[in-house]
Every structure is written in structure tokens, then in C-alpha cells.
Amino acid sequence: MDDLIVIGEAVPDELKDKRKVLCSACYSDEHGLVRIYPIPPNAHMRRWDRVSIPLERNPQDTRGESWKVQGSKREWDVLSEKIHRHGKLPQPGRISLLHKLYRDFGVDCIQNLNDNMLSLGIIKPDVLNAWMEERGERYDPTVQITLDSPTRFFTIHNYKLQPRVKYRCSDCRSQNPHNQQILEWGAYEWMRKHPDNPEQAIPNLRLTDPQYDKYFLVGNMSKYRNAFVVISVFRFKHGTI
């Protein structure tokens, strides 16, 4: 696909074969919302990047929005060379794109995504609370160094804390508020770079700041199709959008 714009990157994870992997969400004029997984960490894709990537369907992931880079396993060591970046979407374009995303892929409630067998969507939340929660038994304090960098590379299991948010959708059909994990990589990067103040990652997202408009890019889990997480938090100061 030659018309991709990155709109979300989830915190890295680790596969059973020990590969460190990323999952990115993109928008394509032709294909709509696109999930790309797995991606190597050295691909260096970031939100609002314009990219072109040769993609193919992933037979292990039947979700309609899911794709993988061609040759993702047999060419893993050089896979990043297939990902070509073409600059970033400028600020005015980001706001226009967010309007388009909400118009075309916005839903009043996550239940609508389930009903229509969609695995990605845009929500305008009424945020009730946001906090840090300990990961518990899934926490792994052992951090490894990747082959292409001397820096210790954190996956989701290397973070003791996880950001969470409780919210209602604009026309919520759920009996109780949604309580979801936030996977936006930027929040976890803050925790990695500021180990003495990891809780600041929550205020950074402006989730409960009344001066900011918030939109969530949400997605479900491959193994648990009814379980959704927040992949990306779009926040703009009032009057910007």
C-alpha cells in the first residue's frame, strides 16, 4: 500500500519465538483503517508518518483490517528495508484527517464495532477516570538488548505499571463504563525514560483535562474479539478542532 498514514503504535510485545514486535494502525484512502502486525522495532514508524509498505493478508489473523508485511517471517532481519517513509502529515492535515476518521469510522459505542465484526474504530469518549495499575504476575523485570541497538528494549511485560482509562461512549449501550488498558507507545516511552515519575504519563495524555478534546482509536484483541483496548489517544486543545 502506497497511501498509508500511521495513526497509532501500540507498545511492543514479544512473540513466542522471542522476536520483539510492534503493531501499528494506519489509515489508507483505499483500504480505510489498517492494522499491520508484526513489525520489527527498527522500522521506526511513528504517528502521522506517511509510509508505503508491501502488505499481504495474515492467514493467522482473520480480522478484516489486519495485514502483515510481505515476507514478514523469512525476511525478518531486513524487513524494515521494505518500509519507506515519506515525511509527516503537517498539523492542519492531522486535524482534517481526525475529522475524516471520526466521520467515516466513528461509532457511538464499542458494542457497534462488535455487532458489525469490526476490529478498529474511533470513539469520542466521556472520560470518567484514568490511573496506573500494577501489571501483577505478567510483569517481567528482565530487559534485553536488541541486536541493532545497545539500548535496553522494553516490551509491554517489562513495565510494572499499565495505564488504564474508564469512560462512557457518546451513546453507550454498555451497562457499566468501559474499563480499558491504554497501549499507546508514547505513554510507555515516558515511563521508560522517567522511571522516577511514571505516573506523569497519565496527565500527559490529557485524558481528564477539560481544556482538551479527546478521541480514542480502539481495537480488539486477536484472541479475544470482544475485548478492546485503546491504541491511540488523540488530544487537541479546545478550538483547535
Image (cartoon, rainbow, N blue to C red):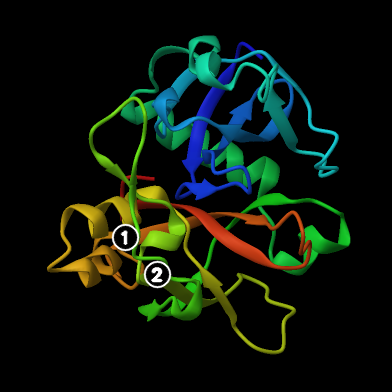
Q: Which of marks 1 and 2 is nearer the N terminus?
A: 2
Q: Where is residue 213 in the image (x, y as percent from the top left)?
A: 39, 58
The CA span between labels 1 and 2 is: 10 Å
Tell me the crowding category of disc 2: few under 14, some 14 to 19, or many 20 or more residues within 10 angstroms, Cα based.
many
The nearer-to-camera label among 1 and 2 is 2
Q: At numbered mark 2, what does the secondary structure look like: helix, strand or loop? A: strand
Q: Are marks 1 and 2 in contact (CB under 8 Å)?
A: yes
Which is nearer the eye, 103 or 227?
Answer: 227
Q: Position of residue 175 (x, y in %)?
A: 71, 89
Q: Quadrant of the C terminus?
A: top left
Where, by quadrant of the figure, is residue 211 drawn?
Answer: bottom left
Tell me the crowding category of disc 1: few under 14, some 14 to 19, or many 20 or more residues within 10 angstroms, Cα based.
some
Q: Residue 126 carries which label?
A: none
Instruction: Name above or below for residue 236 compared with residue 47.
Output: below
The residue at 22%/67% (across/down) is 198
Question: Mark 1 = which residue?
Answer: 205
Callout 1 amino acid? Leu
Where, by quadrant of the figure, is residue 63 drawn?
Answer: top right
Callout 2 amino acid? Pro
Instruction: Name above or below for residue 8 compared with residue 130.
Output: above
The residue at 74%/51% (across/down) is 119
